[in-house]
Amino acid sequence: MPPFNLHTAEFVYDPQDPEGYRAGMARFGPGIGATLLGGTIYELPPGQSICPYHFEYGDEEWLILLDGRATLRRPQGEEEVGPGDVVCFPAGPDGAHKVTNRVGGPCHVLMLSTKNDPAIAAYPDSDKVGVFPGGGDEGLLFRRKDAVDYYEGEGEPRQG
């Protein structure tokens, strides 16, 4: 497999991302043959975040700030990170995080993570849980309040 160069990454912006979450991304793990670790470099314009405040169940993530400055929200509060800073987000609630660019120019963030399948994430601000089969971006998201009892719907077999 050919190497991936972080300095020449081509970023893809999803036109469906809402304002506040419009980050360009270049996912490169599969292209270098990775199966146990994921790698994505983000181009984060001013005023944008990579994704909502969240944590992973079972997966550890690392942030490496390549250039620019970003505000990092974690359970213990907010802090600014700069070029060369490396941060680990452990699996579970202690690893909750959100990365936002609050300065004048773009920044570039490298995120690395383990890749469990399915991936499961929790979003404390909106009280949602997401399940992402196959490690993909297309997942199933549910509000915790919509949870059902373990035996609900288990009485009679479904017809049809």
Image (tube, grey):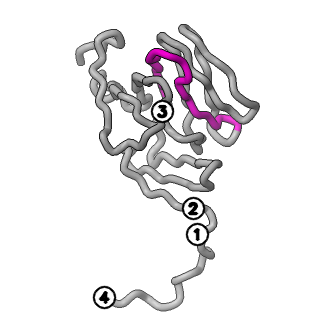
Amino acid type of the residue tagged 2 in the rendering = Arg
| Mark seen at residue 3 | none
Query: Of marks 4 and 2, which one's residue comes earlier in the chain?
Result: 2
Amino acid type of the residue tagged 4 in the rendering = Gly
Mark 1 in CB contact with mark 2 (< 8 angstroms): yes
Query: Of marks 3 and 1, which one's residue comes earlier in the chain?
Result: 3
| Mark seen at residue 146 | 1
Q: Disc 3 to disc 2, how far (Cα)?
A: 21 Å
Query: Of marks 3 and 2, which one's residue comes earlier in the chain?
Result: 3
Query: Of marks 4 and 3, which one's residue comes earlier in the chain?
Result: 3
| Mark seen at residue 160 | 4
Q: Quadrant of the C terminus?
A: bottom left
Amino acid type of the residue tagged 3 in the rendering = Ile
In front of the other: label 1 or label 4? 1
Mark 4 in CB contact with mark 3 (< 8 angstroms): no
**Which residue is pictured at 45% across the width and 49% down the height?**
118
- Occupied quadrant, residue 102: top right
**Which residue is pictured at 34% across the width and 9% down the height?**
7
* Image: magenta residue range: 94-112
Tag 3 residue: 50
Tag 2 residue: 143
Q: Disc 4 to disc 3, how far (Cα)?
A: 43 Å
